[in-house]
Image: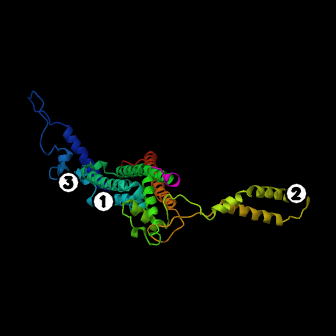
Amino acid sequence: PLSAWPHNLALGRGCAWAHSRAMSQPPPMSRGSLSPPAYTTDPQYSTPPVFQASASQRPSTIGGLNCGGYGSLAPRQEHDLKVPAGTRNVFIAIGATLILLLCVVPVWNALALLQDQNYVFWHGKNLPVWMLGLCAWVFVVFVLTMVCFFKFSVPQAQTEQTVMMMANIFITLLGLALILVSLPLSRQATDTYTNLMHRCDYSPETHRLFEYSQVLHNIRNAPGCAAKYSVEECDGYQDAAPYTTFLKSMESDFRCSGFCYQHVKRDSEEPAAVAQEGGNASKGDDVAAALLLFRDRKSKTLQADHTAPQALLGMASSAKKIHNPVIDFPPTLFNNGNYKASCDGMAARDIKNFAGDVSYQTFYQGIYLVLIAITTSFLKLIGFCVHREPVDKNY
């Protein structure tokens, strides 16, 4: 009961004092003895070390005091300080779930890159596989480290500060891994976009596909093949993976036609454009004269003349039509859709908008993870420096 607590505390202190007193004083010397007697080794007055003591070896009476409960005042054994198995499993499960949640976005992006035929054709599957491998490695190493820590570490080290430090280590490791993976991915997207848009017919990355595309267009433009549904039905066609497969997938996915195709003007419009070149100089002079006349009228009168601007707009539109002839697109190779978009431009924009965005997302996620780990570490350090009120040692 609570009413007997002061009495029990006083009894425990008296037993401890009596025990230390009995151990520090030797027994009295007998008369006629030339040397002092040795210290007694009676089990009643000697106690083995704490790590070897047991309940049966602790004395029940010391100095006439009833100290039957004195053994309960000894320090707890080492097995009593260990974290229980249930709590240990909860810590490991929560940490593993946290790492899995942090790896969801990189794993999702890596799987999406593996399923994108445009990216896989230009750069292969090495980088997405590395992303998956790094995320799996961080997760497995984290779980093994937690299990070994709770199993083999000393009980005094199994504190929340140590668990938080381990979590920060692996969060920082995951963030650095994502940053390192995002840099080559961004470089790949930028280089491929530049080659497709500006060096499509002669860059080492795109030249081989350009050659296959030109050969297939030559077969497609043959008289006996133009009316057919696909170039696969024409004489002379032969599969050459992965080039013909990629050209076919681009036409079906992007709804485009022609790869690095050189745009050609229509033959019917070339004579008209040449015939009107001689009148371009005179029409230019007429436009300049009309502009001067319109400015002179506007400066003299407050009423604006709307006829001159409309005439000028009509002349400008006619001149624009002369200098911008209609552009032909090549026929599609593997269907009869004849789409009005170039496959090289569509592929360039796709790899920039998809692979480039994945690289940016991966990079910023790694930066955020590193910043979170640093912030939590500083907060924990500040918590150690906060002044706390001293604990009363009398209780």
1 vs 3, front mark? 1
Question: As drawn, is 23 to the left or to the right of 253?
Answer: left
Which residue, given by chain and number where applicable, does mark 3 sit on?
68
Which residue, given by chain and number where applicable, does mark 1 sit on?
87
Q: Three-letter amino acid code at disc 3?
A: Gly
Mark before the other along the chain sequence, 1 or 2:
1
Residues at badges 1 and 2 in contact (C-beta under 8 Å)?
Answer: no
Query: Residue 294: image x %, image y %?
Result: 85, 59
Question: As drawn, is 45 to the left or to the right of 371?
Answer: left
For the N terminus, the quadrant is bottom left
The outermost residue toward the top is 34
Secondary structure under tag 3 reads loop
Which residue, given by chain and number where applicable, does mark 2 sit on?
296
Mark before the other along the chain sequence, 1 or 3:
3
Q: CA distance from mark 2 to mark 3?
A: 121 Å
Query: Residue 285: image x %, image y %?
Result: 79, 55
Q: Quadrant of residue 209?
A: bottom left
